[in-house]
Amino acid sequence: MLYPSLFDSFFAPTRVIVVSEERLKAAEQEARREQLEALDNRIEELNKYRTTLSAQIQKLEPTKVGGDLDALDGANGNG
């Protein structure tokens, strides 16, 4: 049969899978471990990227000439 009828889809036997509670808990625990590992990997990637980006920002910031003179005359460095 090339195209199954709509009638057949309503009366097709359903599939039931029986799993023990221990196996279900083990599968849930494994899934959570995998999620935690994925999150840890992502956090590590983001921390590396943050460090790199912070270093790039430090390189791009202009150095203030005479900034130590502001401290001597009590100025706050805004002009």
Image (cartoon, grey):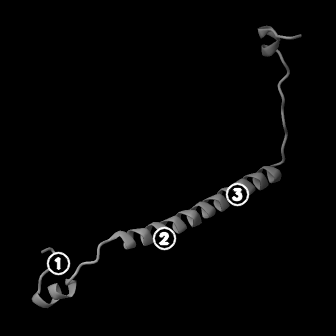
Label 3 sits on residue: 34
Q: Position of residue 31 (x, y in %)?
A: 71, 53
User: Identity of the amino acid at label 2?
Assistant: Thr
Nearer the camera: disc 3 or disc 1? 1
User: Is disc 1 surrounded by few (<14), some (14 to 19) or many (20+) residues within 10 Å?
Assistant: few
Label 1 sits on residue: 77
| Of the image marks 3 and 2, the number of the one nearer the N terminus | 3
Q: Is residue 43 left or right of residue 11?
A: left
User: Identity of the amino acid at label 3?
Assistant: Glu
Q: Residue at x 58, y 66 (%)?
A: 44
Nearer the camera: disc 3 or disc 2? 2
Secondary structure, mark 3, is: helix
**How far separated are the C-alphas under marks 2 and 1?**
27 Å
Q: Are marks 3 and 1 in contact (CB under 8 Å)?
A: no
Q: How many numbered markers are drawn?
A: 3
In what quadrant of the picture does the C terminus appear? bottom left
| Of the image marks 3 and 1, the number of the one nearer the N terminus | 3
Front-lying residue, 10 or 35? 35
Q: Is residue 2 left or right of residue 64?
A: right
Q: Position of residue 66 (x, y in %)?
A: 19, 84
Image: 21 above or below 76: above
Secondary structure, mark 1, is: loop
Q: Residue at x 85, y 21 (%)?
A: 13
Front-lying residue, 21 or 26? 26
